Image: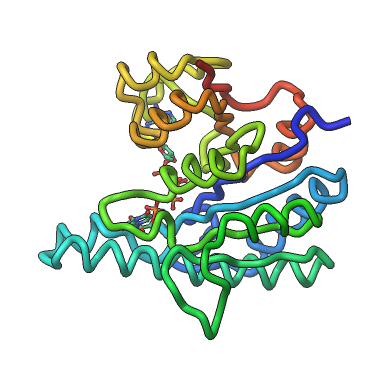
Amino acid sequence: MPAYQSVLLKLSGEALMGDDSYGINPLTIEAMATEISEVVQLGVKLAIVIGGGNIFRGVAGGAAGMDRATADYMGMLATMMNSLALQDSLRQKGVEARVQSALRMDQVVEPYIRPRAIRHMNEGKVVIFAAGTGNPFFTTDTAAALRGAEMNVDIVLKATKVDGIYSSDPKKDPLATRYDTISFDEAIVKNLQVMDATAFALCRDRELPIKVFSILKPGALMRVVNGDPEGTLVHV
Ligand SMILES: Nc1ncnc2c1ncn2[C@@H]1O[C@H](COP(=O)(O)OP(=O)(O)OP(=O)(O)O)[C@@H](O)[C@H]1O
Ligand SMILES: O=c1ccn([C@@H]2O[C@H](COP(=O)(O)O)[C@@H](O)[C@H]2O)c(=O)[nH]1
């Protein structure tokens, strides 16, 4: 019996690159789809938000002199590409998946309609929320917190490239130490950059726990869903 009956999985866009320097690595996305399909087979209701860092981040466009809001819309379109790719990979594994977009793209995907998303999940389909929140100046972490709260899931799972939350960025600080658990207040006060403060604050207010773990570690998603020790739990 899984530890959680319904989850919102936030998948790192950057992790989709695998060993490449840009874009979607076919073997990497296939491996992720396999791990996701195993969780779906357990009967867990699953919704997914994917980042876009493997293709475009608004902050990079802004730094290069672009209008920041325009750059952010480009970032949201990047998440659309990732969402379509994941939908395709999941379907190849026999998993029914539906992309819903926060920005209208009616010839390609459904618009975000909350009751319809809930119905898809109740029918056992995986819902992939594309285009983040649909608003510039936000991130897909915040979209994950928002959709997780709207879908009333048991937990938000942030699947990223590091195996939990550290005292500082482990990619930059070799002395960083990992937390098994941390409160929302501590994560916000310590300004731990693994997830943005808006996402932490929204989940704290909704009393929606977050688990941060590595999607690059084989079997980690299943261990998290089963409640086995893995990653860092952020709690109220
Ligand atoms: N205190 C910290 N603990 C853990 N990771 C941290 C910390 N501070 C910064 N990081 C960095 O945060 C990254 C994860 O956050 P980020 O939102 O940038 O990436 P992502 O969610 O994996 O990618 P994307 O935005 O493409 O979805 C990690 O890869 C890690 O290097
Ligand atoms: O609600 C949102 C979500 C995302 N964006 C833009 O998309 C990129 C990619 O998302 P990541 O969370 O960084 O993976 C992000 O950098 C923003 O530019 C957005 O504007 N609004």
Q: Residue at x 80, y 63 (%)?
A: 95
Observer-nearest residue: 136 or 35?
136
Q: Is residue 28 above or below residue 38?
A: below
User: On the rendering, which quadrant does ligand 1 occupy?
Assistant: top left
Which residue is more in the foreground, 35 or 25?
A: 35
Q: Residue at coordinates 59% horizontally, 34% vertically from top-left? A: 213
Quarter of the picture holding the N terminus: top right
Task: Give x and y (percent) for residue 16.
Answer: 55, 59
Residue 157: image x %, image y %? 60, 37
- Place of residue 187 in the rendered image (x, y in percent of width and height, measured from the top left): 39, 20
- Residue 180's place in the image compared with 193, above or below, is above
Q: Examine the image and state in which quarter residue 195 appears.
A: top left
Judged from this view, the residue extending furthest toward the bottom is 107
Left or right, 110 with reference to 136: right
Left or right: residue 213 versus residue 145 is: right
Where residue 191 sits in the image (x, y, percent)?
30, 24
Viewer-side residue, 203 vs 40: 203
Whether residue 21 appears in this view of the structure is: no
Question: Is residue 100 in sight in this rendering?
Answer: yes
Residue at figure coordinates x 57%, y 75% from the top left: 109
Looking at the image, residue 153 lies above or below residue 184: below
Above-or-below relation of 205 to 218: above
Outermost residue, front side: 115
The type of colouring in the image is: rainbow
At horizontal 10% and vertical 65% (from top left) the residue drawn is: 65
- In which quarter of the view is residue 128 placed? bottom right
* Number of numbered discs on residues: 0
